[in-house]
Amino acid sequence: MASWIEDAQREDLRARMDASLSAIGFHCQRTHVEGRVKAEEIEQRAFSAADVSSSTTSGARPTIEVMRLYVKKAAELMREAIEQGAEDIGAGQEGEDMDTDEFDVGKTSKDREFYTQQRAEQVLAPLLAKGAAYSKVRLSTKSFGIDAAKVASRAFVNLAKTLKEVDLSDTIAGRPEVEALKAMEIFSEGLTAAELTAVDLSDNAFGEKGVRACRKLLEEQKSLTSIAFLNNGISEQAARAIHELLACPEKLTRFHLDKNMTGDDGTVHIAAIVSKAKGMKDFKMAGSRFFSEGAIMLAKALAQGNSLERLDLNDNNVNEEGAAALVDVLPKHANLQYLNLEATALGEEMGGTLLQAVAQGCSKLEVLHISSNDFMREGAEGVARAIAGMKNLKVLSIGDNELGDFGFTQICMALKESGAPLVELDASCNELQRAGAVAAAHLAASKPGFRSLNLDGNFIPDEAVEEVESILKAAGIEIALLPMEDNDPEGEADDEGDVDALLGALASIKV
């Protein structure tokens, strides 16, 4: 028995919920509800959530706080059960259908649950059934303790012949460190029975200890082509552990890291992995706190192959030195379709140089994110020259670069000249006034299938906003303009250059 609540109190809550659920089912939904069964399930889930929170790293939480969480959680689950019952009646069915090949615990309930052994056995019953043959399993957003992890491990063993992809992201939230690490060990032990091709360990803030808790998973899975560590606290030591334990890095085609604290020292180990993965198609190392030194190491690693289709290095200080290293590497990846270099401090000169190299070597590029790179008005010409060569560009995000009207209008002209099938354009926070906004509207109106234009955060006068709306309405795409809540119609920006000639050319585009 938990020290913060007595069994009699738990039984009293179950009885009250049973009566309420049965009455609501009969009087409001005209259905028979197994009130007692549902009440027991709700109470157990509320108890589990509260019990996990009852202890902290500094000791026991005050009983009144735990009790409040218990009652609040039970109330939330009661409401969810009532609303779900009404939806089921309206739809004439129960629950959400599960794919015959893919099992997702997120479809069993919307609640972030703390699984007990009993609840895990209930939810994972299809995986434990004789003859189960799922190839993909997603346990994300449900928190597994040791007993619940053992149930999942049994399920993995039962699926050994068919299981290929497992999503273990966000599966130990709220658990004490010792219990969370043990749960990861148990998951890993069960998965050794299967031959996996993809695993996602994201959103488990476990650092090096967590990586090493997954030792058996990393060491014994020799067919992995995809692995993800997003928001895992991947420090230098954790990155070294991944490099040390990963059995066959040369087979990776997809490797994702994000929101970590890897730094240049940790990037040494990530780059070592990437250099072996010569068939890499999708590499992401965003928000990882590396600088130009780390970018140079990654460039050298990526130079070992030529198969990239997606590259995401956003929110790192690549700087001009790192960009210079990428100039020689990215053109080798002729199949590159997606490039995210947002907030990488490319600068006004090197930004244009790198993008021109991409335009020349990566003719299949469709998506380009280059916001927040300090291009300024001075760098607009070089960037525009590069964009003019991107014939297949569909999505361009170039916000927060202080391009001004003249600089941004050059970008619009480049997109016109390229003939690119553009459908999305983000030009927010660029100190645009009337000319830049109208240029964007004419460009959008000229592109078949255009669906999204972001001009928020600029200095566009009210009458210019109306002009933009009129141009888009005439083209039948007025819905494409996103809300402009942060636009400052009275703002002023210093701008130079003859925008009129460029505007005239844009206005002549046939819609």
Image (cartoon, rainbow, N blue to C red):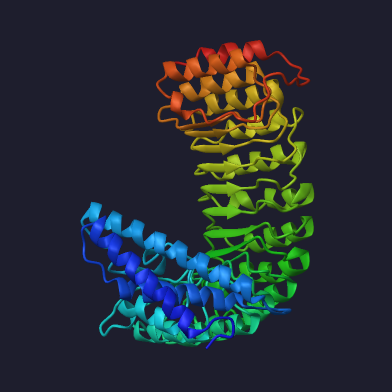
Q: Where is residue 346 in the image (x, y as percent from the top left)?
A: 74, 44
Between 186 and 44, which is closer to the camera in this rendering? 44
The answer to which quarter of the image holds residue 436 is: top right
In the rendered view, tell whether residue 412 sits above or below residue 187.
Answer: above
In the rendered view, tell whether residue 261 sits above or below residue 467.
Answer: below
Between 428 and 296, which is closer to the camera in this rendering? 428
Between 193 and 277, which is closer to the camera in this rendering? 193
Image quadrant holding the C terminus, namely top left
Q: Position of residue 230 (x, y in %)?
A: 60, 64
The answer to which quarter of the image holds residue 264 is: bottom right
In the rendered view, tell whether residue 297 sits above or below residue 129.
Answer: above
Between 466 and 287, which is closer to the camera in this rendering? 466
In the rendered view, tell whether residue 75 sits above or below residue 434.
Answer: below
User: Do we see residue 191 in this rendering?
Assistant: no
Q: Position of residue 403 (x, y in %)?
A: 71, 28
Residue located 58% across and 54% down the image? 311
Residue located 68% across and 64% down the image? 260
Q: Position of residue 387 (x, y in %)?
A: 60, 33
